[in-house]
Image (cartoon, rainbow, N blue to C red):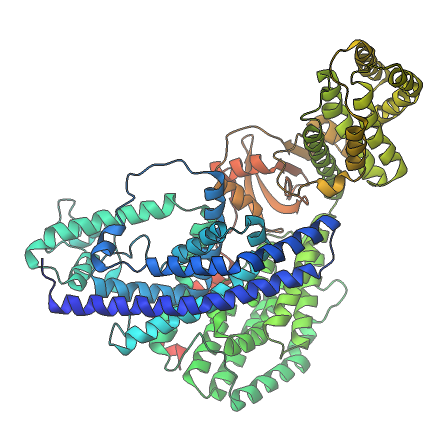
């Protein structure tokens, strides 16, 4: 079927946009490759264990060897993502209904690529949304095809897949993934922006109005079409605004309107369902937050002449002078007197109202001094955001008053870095969100004073360095993170729980790792099952406790490690008299070391005697055994490896750790009623929920439904290996939850965040509501 000239022209323009996008993305690859090489070189120079240093050196060598192959693979993959229009129209349907099993490597690759895609989406969501709408308009399609090169997930998938095909190890990617994500996000923002500029220069949707494109659910459409009537909607007159808009964009024939509108309605329901089921709760929260920021960006782009979120700028001389005067007045005026730290100072709503009045006066003064529309809009939006924060009565008044002083530093950053309005990862946003999540619901009578003092210190540090921009926000964000780690873990009974739980995790992890290593060493040795069971179930735990107590290279620990090798040799076949005589001579000392090690576990004498009896009988049987003897060289190699066993231990996940509730309560020494240990069991959570567990932030408040009782808890501590998580309730109780069980609670809705939306996102939403109702105030 022939394509209409107008459609042919539009599709040609879309192809040119893809070609430009791909060309710039390929140009970016060389910069990315150099960045990865530099990052690996920096890692080599950093301190670390012998094993880590060797892994880093190996990573540099393998990257240098296979870098060119990876780049060529990426170039080929990007180029193949530009199919002809006929193929493009069908590509999105090729995999529908196709089911297949995926290997672990494929799953891990998809996890890595999804993390990279989320980071790019976080930085470039505005530009991507605009580009998506323009391409949909040109190609007359409801959505970009599944493998479209414009999609961040497609780009990320190609990068990670070609990395594996190069071949480059996955652990090398993990070493540099933070650098890769940051570099890709920043560069792809420019690529998306350049592609949008190209389309705008060719007259494609210079102004984007999303309201006609909103898809409504069928119930909403029926209600709007026939108010007060529950009957059927008219096929034409009852079509939704979304249906009419999409129909207009697609240049549909009038007689096809009925079926198209119905399909639009079905598509809207499917999109909503897909969004709710195909993504994790955390991803959905991020999507909603990005929607708020996208709304703000469109508002600024449409109503503020000359606004450019991709280019840093400086305040005009008049505004800079006014900001300096306001800051000096704030330092010497009444407000510092109110905020001055005084013993027993209690802040109330009166102080918050005064801070709010000062905020409004500062805003008025600064807008009068502003020289451009962009400056006026930035001043107004920042002011509205802080007004919303000050109106949040769930934050203690004293903390809200200190938040008010951040208006000027945040305003400086917002003017210099318009990215503040578009990125959830901006340090200023992250700092306010983190402090706000901890302060929401904080019991000021218990520990709020300590938190308030820390927030006061952070605000004062930021005010002392007004010209450092985002760097000071990042610095104090890291400091606040460390403060939370210390502060939350040192409160009352929580401190004792944390100390013991960390030791238990360390001991259990090392015991599992020692068991894995000894299994590997004994895999092809003729060792009796009784000796294997003793080494794996008893002696591995002995070595773990000794390493924790004395250190892995302490003389006592080395003696216990050597005893494991001696036991393996003694229990092997002894065909000659010299070997039997040596075993008999060494046996008393060996049994004494074994008994000393079991005593470290707290085993009683009867249990020790039972283990030693089994060992003695096995040694006696070895004298009569006709199996092959274990060469002394292999025993010496095992003893040498055991002495330096820590160099072979892997940092990979060792699985869910065993946890004995009764022993834990006894070791902590607190009333069992004050701690709930939620151990392994329950349903099997999905990988998405396990990933969510790893992204929980300390200090955040949750609602925990455990055994039918709902508690208001704060995430207080996470063990080093993220196996154990501690939640502290306001009534003094503690909940120690294993990682897998915690993921199951999240999946079942038994653990819910008190606030799903970050403080600055909610403040932005409130500001947008006011500006939508009264747009004149933005530039007024």
Answer with left or right where residue 374 lies relative to residue 98: right
Residue at the limit of the structure toward the bottom, as seen here: 318
- Taking depth in this image into account, of 411 and 563 the one nearest to the observer is 563
Residue at the image point whose x is 51% and y is 57% from the top: 758
- Quadrant (top left, top right, bottom left, bottom right) of the N terminus: bottom left
- Placement of 284 over or under 550, stated as above or below: below
- Taking depth in this image into account, of 209 and 735 the one nearest to the observer is 209
Residue at the image point whose x is 58% and y is 63% from the top: 37
Residue 307: percent from the left, percent from the top? Answer: 40, 79
Residue 242: percent from the left, percent from the top? Answer: 21, 58
Residue 443: percent from the left, percent from the top? Answer: 65, 51
Answer yes or no: is residue 348 visible.
Answer: no
Answer with left or right where residue 324 lies relative to residue 116: right
Residue at the image point whose x is 28% and y is 64% from the top: 133
Answer yes or no: is residue 318 visible.
Answer: yes
Query: Could you say which quadrant of the image residue 303 lies in?
Result: bottom left
Residue at the limit of the structure toward the left, as seen here: 255
- Placement of 617 over or under 767, stated as above or below: above
- Taking depth in this image into account, of 537 and 245 the one nearest to the observer is 537
Residue 250: percent from the left, percent from the top? Answer: 17, 61
- Placement of 208 over or under 682, stated as above or below: below
Answer with left or right where residue 765 lies relative to residue 469: left
Query: Could you say which quadrant of the image residue 555 lies in?
Result: top right
Residue at the image point whose x is 65% and y is 69% from the top: 459
Query: Could you say which quadrant of the image residue 545 lies in?
Result: top right
């Amino acid at each position: 079927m022939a394509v209409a000239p107008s459609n042919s022209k539009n599709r040609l323009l879309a192809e040119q946009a893809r070609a430009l996008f791909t060309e710039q993305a390929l140009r970016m690859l060389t910069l990315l490759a150099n960045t990865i090489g530099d990052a690996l070189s920096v890692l080599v120079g950093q301190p670390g264990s012998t094993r880590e240093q060797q892994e880093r050196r190996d990573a540099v060598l393998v990257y240098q060897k296979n870098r060119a192959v990876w780049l060529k693979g990426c170039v080929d993959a990007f180029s193949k993502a530009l199919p002809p229009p006929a193929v493009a129209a069908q590509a999105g349907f090729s995999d529908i209904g196709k089911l297949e099993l995926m290997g672990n490597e494929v799953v891990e690759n998809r996890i890595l690529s999804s993390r990279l895609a989320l980071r790019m989406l976080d930085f470039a969501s505005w530009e991507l949304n605009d580009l998506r709408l323009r391409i949909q308009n040109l190609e007359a399609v409801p959505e970009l095809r599944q493998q479209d090169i414009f999609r961040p997930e497609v780009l990320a998938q190609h990068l990670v897949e070609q990395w594996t095909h190069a071949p480059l190890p996955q652990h090398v990617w993990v070493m540099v993934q933070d650098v890769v994500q940051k570099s890709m996000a920043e560069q792809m923002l420019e690529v998306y922006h350049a592609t949008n500029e190209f389309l705008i220069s060719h007259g494609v949707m210079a102004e984007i109005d999303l309201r006609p494109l909103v898809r409504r659910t069928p119930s909403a459409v029926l209600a709007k079409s026939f108010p007060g009537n529950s009957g059927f909607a008219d096929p034409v007159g009852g079509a939704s605004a979304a249906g009419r808009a999409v129909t207009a964009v697609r240049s549909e024939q009038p007689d096809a309107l009925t079926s198209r509108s119905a399909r639009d309605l079905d598509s809207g329901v499917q999109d909503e369902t897909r969004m709710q089921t195909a993504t994790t709760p955390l991803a959905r929260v991020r999507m909603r937050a990005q929607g708020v920021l996208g709304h703000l960006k469109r508002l600024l782009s449409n109503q503020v002449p000359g606004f450019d979120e991709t280019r840093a700028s400086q305040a005009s001389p008049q505004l800079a002078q006014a900001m300096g005067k306001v800051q000096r007045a704030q330092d010497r005026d009444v407000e510092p007197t109110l905020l001055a730290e005084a013993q027993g100072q209690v802040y109330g709503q009166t102080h918050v109202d005064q801070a709010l009045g000062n905020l409004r006066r500062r805003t008025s003064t600064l807008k009068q001094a502003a020289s451009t529309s962009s400056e006026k809009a930035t001043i107004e939006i920042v002011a509205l955001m802080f007004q919303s924060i000050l109106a949040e009565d769930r934050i203690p008044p004293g903390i809200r008053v200190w938040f008010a002083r951040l208006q000027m530093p945040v305003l400086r950053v917002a003017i210099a870095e318009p990215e503040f309005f578009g990125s959830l990862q901006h340090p200023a946003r992250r700092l306010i969100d983190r402090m706000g999540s901890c302060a929401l619901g904080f019991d000021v009578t218990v520990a709020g004073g300590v938190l308030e003092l820390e927030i006061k210190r952070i605000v004062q540090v930021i005010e002392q360095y007004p010209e450092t921009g985002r760097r000071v926000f990042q610095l104090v964000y890291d400091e606040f993170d460390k403060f939370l780690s210390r502060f939350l873990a040192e409160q009352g009974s929580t401190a004792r729980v944390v100390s013991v739980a960390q030791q238990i995790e360390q001991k259990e992890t090392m015991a599992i790792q020692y068991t894995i290593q000894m299994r590997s060493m004994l895999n092809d040795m003729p060792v009796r099952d009784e000796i294997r069971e003793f080494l794996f179930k008893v002696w591995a735990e002995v070595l773990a406790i000794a390493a924790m107590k004395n250190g892995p290279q302490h003389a006592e620990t080395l003696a216990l490690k050597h005893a494991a090798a001696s036991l393996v040799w003694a229990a092997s076949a002894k065909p000659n008299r010299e070997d039997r005589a040596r075993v008999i001579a060494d046996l008393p000392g060996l049994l004494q070391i074994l008994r000393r090690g079991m005593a470290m576990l707290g085993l009683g004498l009867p249990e020790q005697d039972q283990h030693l009896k089994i060992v003695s009988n096995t040694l006696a049987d070895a004298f009569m055994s006709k199996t092959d003897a274990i060469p002394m060289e292999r025993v010496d190699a095992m003893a040498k490896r055991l002495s330096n066993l820590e160099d072979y231990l892997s940092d990979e996940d060792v699985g869910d750790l065993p946890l004995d509730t009764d022993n834990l309560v006894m070791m902590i020494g607190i009333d069992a009623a004050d701690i709930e240990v939620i151990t392994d069991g329950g349903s099997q959570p999905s990988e998405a929920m396990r990933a969510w567990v790893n992204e929980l932030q300390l200090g955040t408040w949750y609602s925990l439904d455990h055994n039918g009782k709902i508690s208001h808890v704060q995430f207080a501590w996470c063990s080093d290996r993220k196996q154990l998580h501690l939640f502290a309730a306001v009534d003094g109780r503690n909940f120690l939850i294993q990682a897998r069980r915690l993921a199951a609670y999240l999946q079942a809705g038994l653990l819910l965040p008190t606030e799903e939306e970050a403080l600055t996102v909610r403040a932005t939403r409130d500001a947008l509501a006011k500006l939508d109702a009264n747009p004149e105030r933005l530039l007024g």
